[in-house]
Every structure is written in structure tokens, then in C-alpha cells.
């Protein structure tokens, strides 16, 4: 495609829209697969509060979406969630609050 005649703000919107669609498609592909333990189906579920253990301590995340098997309940976390836990536990990212 030739973008030489496209106004910069329109190009930015097109790129932003494409990224948004890509993120939605990635999130949809993240769920609906077969559980590796019991062959159930992994479904997205909004979790109000989740405690994750890290070698440096515990991290509490609120209002996150995780994949949960509809048969055995095994939890599947996205790479973004795991990276966030690691960064908070190692001090690279400050927590929003501490209790």
C-alpha cells in the first residue's frame, strides 16, 4: 500500500484500529482450546482478586481475565499477567497499592 498521500492523523487511526483488532483477535484465540490435563475447554473468566506466588513473595491482582478449564478448573494465565507479576515481585514495577 502507498501511504504517501494519506494524512498522518488518518494513518495513525488506521494503525491504532488495526492494533485494536489484532489484540481482540489474539484474546479470542487465547481461549476455547482444550485443557492439557482433562481435555475440558478453557474459557475466559473475569476474576475479582487473584493471588499469585512468586519466589520473592505474593502478588495480588484484581479484575483480571484468566482462562479456566470448564471441567477441572485449572487456570491459564496470559504472558502479560505473568510478566506483570514478575515485574511487581522484583521491584521493576510499583504496585498500585499495598495492603
Image (cartoon, rainbow, N blue to C red):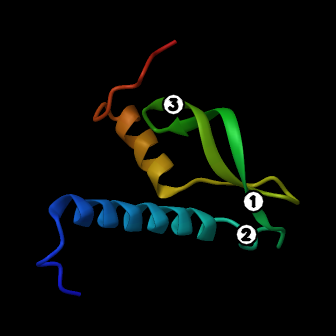
Which residue is farthest left?
4
Q: Can you give x and y, in whole percent of width and height, for residue 47 in the image?
A: 69, 38
Residue 93 numbered mark, or none: none
Q: Residues within 10 Å of mark 2 (few under 14, many from 20)?
A: some
Residue 22 vs residue 13, the one in the foreground? 13
Q: Can you give x and y, in whole percent of width and height, for residue 34 in the image?
A: 75, 73
Badges 2 and 1: C-beta atoms under 8 Å apart? Answer: yes
Q: Residue placed at 49% from the left, 47% from the top? A: 81
In the image, is 21 to the left or to the right of 2?
A: right
Q: Nearer the viewer, mark 1 or mark 3?
A: 1
Residue highlighted by disc 1: 43
Residue highlighted by disc 3: 59
Residue 57 vs residue 9, the one in the foreground? 9
Local secondary structure at mark 1: strand
Q: Residue 50 appears in which quarter of the rendering?
A: top right
Q: CA distance from mark 1 to mark 3?
A: 23 Å
Which residue is farthest top?
99
Residue 32 numbered mark, or none: 2
Q: Earlier in the sequence, mark 2 or mark 3?
A: 2
In the image, is 85 to the left or to the right of 76?
A: left
Local secondary structure at mark 3: strand
Amino acid at each position: 500500500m502507498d501511504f504517501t498521500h494519506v494524512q498522518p492523523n488518518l494513518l495513525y487511526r488506521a494503525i491504532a484500529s488495526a492494533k485494536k483488532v489484532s489484540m481482540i483477535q489474539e484474546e479470542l484465540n487465547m481461549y476455547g482450546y482444550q485443557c492439557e490435563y482433562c481435555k475440558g475447554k478453557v474459557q475466559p473468566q473475569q476474576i475479582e482478586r487473584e493471588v499469585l506466588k512468586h519466589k520473592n513473595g505474593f502478588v495480588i491482582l484484581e479484575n483480571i481475565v484468566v482462562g479456566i478449564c470448564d471441567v477441572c478448573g485449572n487456570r491459564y494465565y496470559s504472558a502479560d499477567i505473568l510478566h506483570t507479576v514478575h515485574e511487581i515481585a522484583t521491584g521493576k514495577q510499583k504496585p498500585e497499592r499495598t495492603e
